[in-house]
Amino acid sequence: MAGTLRQKTKYPGVFYREAARIGGPGIEKVYYIVFKQGGKVFEEKVGRQYSDDMTPARANTIRAERIEGKRQSRKEIREEREAELPVEPERWPILRIPAITNFIIFPASKHWEISHISYLTNHFKALSYSHQL
């Protein structure tokens, strides 16, 4: 597969790898930056040639901003975006819904004998769900 080797650019700390293009045929360049911060070496993906409209010069600008602390990393941006999303209430597992609806819709059905109900109850206790029947 093409694209596993680093290819240098004329900017220090900026390199690219060739990868399959997203949304079209062919190959595109995926740009990465390497820099030191606090004595540790960081390597981050900054973007793709076509889908992110990334160039080596733009990647170098991003690298300079990351070194100076003016720009957040992709991980920090993603975590910040996820923290802004509203928290959904805990949902019941899909496997548990049919058993509960059978208790509610067909409580006196001929097909649901006491042995079936006790089996399901024991089965759900064994799975240790946080919700109660």
Image (cartoon, rainbow, N blue to C red):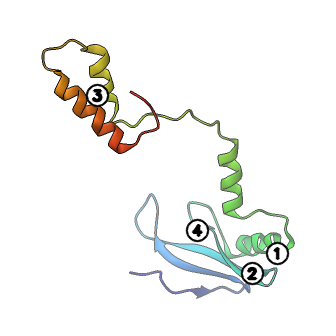
Q: Which residue is mark 2?
A: 35
Choose mark 2 or mark 4, whichever is in front. 2
* Marks 4/3: CA–CA distance: 51 Å
Q: Residues within 10 Å of mark 4 (few under 14, many from 20)?
A: some
Q: Where does the image place residue 60, in percent across and percent down from the top left?
A: 75, 76
Q: Position of residue 105 (x, y in %)?
A: 28, 14
> Label 3 crowding class (10 Å Cα cut-off): few <14, some 14-19, many 20+?
some
Q: Looking at this rendering, what residue extends furthest in the left direction?
A: 110
Q: Earlier in the sequence, mark 2 or mark 4?
A: 2
- Marks 2 and 4 sit apart, C-alpha to C-alpha, by 21 Å
Real-space Cα separation, disc 3 to disc 2, in angstroms = 55 Å
- Residue 110 location (% of width, % of height): 13, 15
Q: Earlier in the sequence, mark 2 or mark 1?
A: 2
Q: Earlier in the sequence, mark 3 or mark 1?
A: 1
**The N terminus appears in which quarter of the rendering?**
bottom left
Question: Is label 2 in a helix, a strand or a loop?
Answer: strand
Image height check: is 110 above or below 77?
A: above
**To which residue does mark 1 refer?**
67
What is the CA distance from the residue labelled 2 to the residue labelled 1?
7 Å
Q: Earlier in the sequence, mark 4 or mark 1?
A: 4
- Between residue 47 and residue 96, name the one nearer to us: 96
Mark 1 and mark 4 in contact (Cβ < 8 Å)?
A: no
Q: Please tell me in which quadrant of the rendered image residue 96 appears.
A: top left
Amino acid type of the residue tagged 3 in the rendering: Ala
Of marks 4 and 3, which one's residue comes earlier in the chain?
Answer: 4
In percent of the image, x 85 and y 64: which residue is there? Answer: 70
Comparing marks 4 and 3, which lies closer to the viewer? 3
- Lower position in the chain sequence, tag 3 or tag 2: 2
According to the picture, the residue beneath numbered tag 3 turns out to be 99
